[in-house]
Image (spheres, helix red, strand yellow):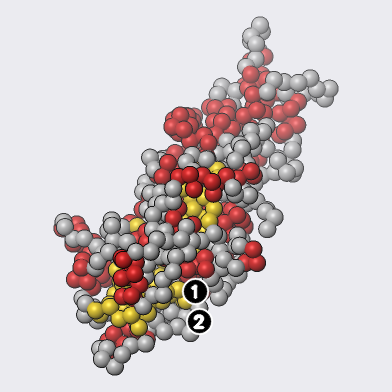
Amino acid sequence: MTTPTTPDAARAIAQGYAFTGPALDLGALLWDGRCLPDASVRVPLGMLSRHGLVAGATGTGKTKTLQLIAEQLSAQGVPVFLADVKGDLSGVSAPGAAGDRVARRAAEVGQDWSPQGCPAEFYALGGIGPGIPVRATVTSFGPVLFSKVLGLNTTQEQSLGLIFHYADGKGLELVDLKDLRAVVAFLTSEEGKGELKGIGGISPATAGVILRSLTAFEAEGAGPFFGEPEFDTAELLRTTEGGGRGTVSVLELAAVQDRPRLFSTFLMWLLADLFEDLPEVGDLDRPKLVFFLDEAHLLFTGASRAFLEAITQTVRLIRSKGVGIFFVTQTPKDVPAEVLGQLGNRVQHALRAFTPEDAKALKATVRTFPTSPYDLEELLTGLGTGEAVVTVLSENGAPTPVAATRLRAPRSLMGPVAPEALDAAVKGSARYARYAQAVDRESAYERLSERPTPTPTPMPAPAPATRKREERPGEEPGVVEQVMGSGVFQSLARSVGTQIGREISRSLFGTSKRRRRR
């Protein structure tokens, strides 16, 4: 509620945020240099699945904003996923620390502040860093995402897709990196040339580039990220006993900051996997899950057209599965226009205009906001830490008026928890025992490397490469050639229609579609 002395424009803005249903409190309206604690700026809970953007220059408070939204979602029973790139979000699990700054902010915005942490689980890619290991099999990761992490061009990406198609059809399970390397190595070998020609005319040179990129990728230490047990993304949908509070899943990425292409692509695998598993639900009164992708520009750096199209399609469609995505980055221009157009909620922190390029970006950002009584160009460069320009979707789906906002203080700890507390939380989790130990079972590498075994059944006619070998008496056949001619491999090739042998159905990202027990 505003007072009679509040200007008409400010009252009209405040009225735009007076929702009747459940909503999250972002802060209080700023007008003419004053904070109006009775004029709350809010976002309807049901609109959090319409995606959003949290943007602003370094040090303006983006991390605290996503923490503020995340803890309120958890309190409303909505699970949350946080990509913690800088390693400063583990504090969401612990009660905040009272102090003069927090008390002053709470008084300014009319917040009844008390410390409270959220139920949280901590994960780490491949177990590198503090967290329960998160792994994916190469098969489920798929060729489009793999092309992104390997830095392949469009032609090479298409060729990798055909290689996955070949492995799928032959029942060669791609569990870890050595499996994919074994398949590509076979197809580039003398013995595999015939097979290579049979899967779409991939040139040996292109296959060789893929193999070298894969070998270099493995040498960089990427192996632990791929394998089994594969992470079940259903873990991200958990709530506390009785569904009271949503679990905050924090993916700790600080230990792999030097591999941004890998971890940003892994985040898209998580989304793609959820997209394939979750049923259509339409509009809900609250989301099933909300993702916060920090340093979101890393998703799009060096991305192929196919990758960008897949992201756009996923963002567009996953809303109907009840999943919201918030991109957290420095400027809106970090996010492609096709993706930006899908984002209904926006919290824009201060922007800097120190260079002509900055000034140009500022003007472009101002043009993306609805018409406003504020001088947004001046306002966006003058906002303080913990202040932002907000516009969200109202309960009827229309954009709310642009509101300069002083944001609330998070109730959880604004900073990381102690390392020993984080380690105890990880090892005390019920999920730690399930995912901690890697499993290396028989898959494509072992099948292509194993020695032939005697078989009583007649051997089929040899492949051309094998025939050429047999015409050279006294020369021993190669290992891969022996495998291709063995009963084991022939049995494997005939296994189309079985759980392992049938071709895998793939999604927008080329990820495999797997049925999960929900």
Give residue 145's position: percent from left, percent from top: 49, 46
Answer whether residue 231 is visible to the viewer in this image. Answer: no
Q: Amino acid at mark 1?
A: Leu
Q: Of helix, strand and loop, which one carries label 2?
A: loop
Residue 45: mark? 1
Q: Residue furthest top?
A: 474
Residue at image coords 57%, 49%? 511
State which quarter of the image contains the C terminus: bottom right
Vertical placement of residue 378 versus 143, above or below: below
Asked whether disc 2 touches disc 1, contact meaning CB atoms under 8 Å apart, the reply is yes
Q: Of helix, strand and loop, which one carries label 1?
A: helix
Residue 21: mark? 2
305 horizontally vs 125: left or right: left
> Badge 2: few (under 14), some or many (20 or more) residues near its Cα, within 10 Å?
few
Give residue 516's position: percent from left, percent from top: 67, 53
Q: Residue furthest bottom?
A: 4
* Front-most of residues 164 and 289: 289
Q: Amino acid at mark 2?
A: Gly
Residue at image coords 41%, 75%? 112
Residue at image coords 44%, 69%? 114
Residue at image coords 41%, 49%? 87
Q: Quadrant of residue 68?
A: bottom left
Answer whether residue 387 is visible to the viewer in this image. Answer: yes
